[in-house]
Image (cartoon, rainbow, N blue to C red):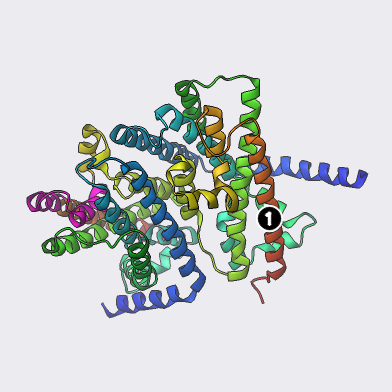
Amino acid sequence: MRKACRELIHYLDVTVHMFKMAVMTVIEYPSNIAGWLISNPLQFIMGFAIIKFVVESFGEINGWNYGQLAFLYGLSVISHALSMIFFVQGWFMGYYVMEGDFDRYLTRPLGVMYQFFFTNINIVGITDLIPGVLVFIYGCVKSGVTVNLLFIVQIIVTLIGATLIRGGIYILLGSTSFHTRSAVDFGQYTQEIMDKTTMYPMSMYPESMQFILTYLIPIGWISFYPAASFLGINSRYAGMMIPFITLAAGVLVMLAAGAYFSMGLRKYESAGN
Amino acid sequence: MKKYLYVGKTQVIKSLTYEFNVYGNIVMQTIIMITSAYFWRALYQGRGMVGDVDADSMLTYVVMSSLLSVLLITNVERRIQMSVQKGTVATDLMKPINIFGVYFAEDIGNITALLFQNVLPILFIGSLMIKVPVIADIRDLPLFIISVLVSFLINWLIAALFGMIAFSAVNIDALIQVKKHLLRLLSGSIIPIWFFPPGISRIMESLPFVYIYQLPLSIYIGRGDRTQYLSQMRIQFVWLVILLGAFFFAQSRVTRKVLVQGG
């Protein structure tokens, strides 16, 4: 027990240092920060504007009005930003496999998966967080949800779960590189699919797709079910328990991803061979 | 010319090496295409014409947009950034061949491979699962093909111009993202700009982006008439000339800069 505790403290200590290093690396290139500060918010502001145009042309989207869509969009973007900060490496795993970069991690006395994700904490992801929070607050006001302590706790639990679901999916997709030994940049595609399924009400898709997105690939729990239950919109699932189901789904996906990652790592051979 | 053909051929062979990439790309693009189709189906439910277009044409738009997006993949901006970062650009420029020509040939080679690896499978799957994308008026086919070729060139020139920023900024990851989002949202590849408020769509019609996706696709689904197409293609052509001018100007600037620094 004491040994486990000491190890945990060691990991936390290392994480703090890594975090500091990540901040410094970002500060090194000021012009790049400026670029990200424009590009990321721009992306989401434009995306949000497009939702507005669609609503104006078509009226409600599957019974969701503009304010409710803003709520859904905000929730989705915030969890996207958090997953970008901690798990974006999953997108680039193929390049690490191809160039033999896991060698360095294997020789160090820390978990490989931990090192892979935490030596490269992506501070830049915070630039996604800003538009997400803004749109979310706007959505809260427009849709008239009552903000109290319970709501805030539920939102935090939802966001943790949603971030884990997204991160787990990135790791699962990235780990395929161990077996295929190729670098497929799934990032853009995953993002596009996630955008379509988490930023718009999932109920607009056919039953079979909803089934897949609820039980097989739990993308529906990232934003759709939580938002529907907060806003009191009729959906298959609603109630107080939703955020915790999201959390549970996140933990499950993460565990599966971890197992698949370690399985792949066993197959990994360094670039030299 | 022969040299560039050779570069293109090598790129085709390179693209054929990684089988998994091909299947992965097809699966991902198919999922995106089908979700978009359901997206529009749900929006159009119980509505006839919105923005002068009915649901059926919109589905054709989705399938064709997916196909076009494969043809409009460029790698030139990343190639420039990489050669500037690694410093190989200096030796590249000494070779008796234009490096931008090489990048262009590489992109053409890549797309040639993709034509068989991705375009045909996606067309097949799209026809099977969504709808067979039939051109609205077969007599407009030549116009469609010409506008696609011009849009390919416009798209490549914009990518190359963005890439050249790497000569002074070195790291252009962020800028590549900016360009990607601008293109995705302003070109009508996801949501056609005729759904936007009139003021905004008028501004966007004066930018080059709509002439990359939306113009060829409008011709294909038959939104508008021939005089409209021709006048829009004239603007498209003007943009091509402007971008070509900008490209050659920037090219001479950046190569001179590298040659001066290289001593």
Residue A222 in the magenta stretch? The answer is: no
Relative to B98, say whether A105 is above or below.
above
The C terminus of chain A lies in quadrant: bottom right
Residue B137: image quadrant is bottom left
Please name the predominant secondary structure of the magenta segment in the image.
helix
Give percent across and percent down for residue B215.
Answer: 21, 52
Horizontal side of residue A252 vs B28, given as left or right: right
Give percent across and percent down for residue B193.
Answer: 26, 42
The N terminus of chain A lies in quadrant: top right
Q: Residues within 10 Å of mark 1 (few under 14, many from 20)?
A: some
Residue B152: image quadrant is bottom left
Relative to B248, say whether A251 is above or below.
above
Q: Amino acid at mark 1?
A: Ala
Residue A63: image quadrant is top left
Q: Front-most of B140 and B84?
A: B140
* Pointer 1 chain: A
Give the magenta part as a residue range: B209-235
Give percent across and percent down for residue A169.
Answer: 59, 52
Q: Is residue A125 visible?
A: no
Relative to B97, say whether A74 is above or below.
above
Q: Residue furthest left?
A: B227
Residue B226 in the magenta stretch? The answer is: yes
Residue, x 42% and y 59% (percent of image)? B29
Q: What residue is disc 1 on?
A: A256
Relative to B56, say whether A106 is above or below.
below
Q: Front-most of B172 and B111?
A: B111
Horizontal side of residue B28 vs B233, given as left or right: right
Residue, x 22% and y 40% (percent of image)? B51
Give percent across and percent down for residue B4.
Answer: 31, 75
Residue, x 55% and y 68% (percent of image)? A182
Horizontal side of residue A236 vs B9, given as left or right: right
Q: Is residue A72 visible?
A: yes
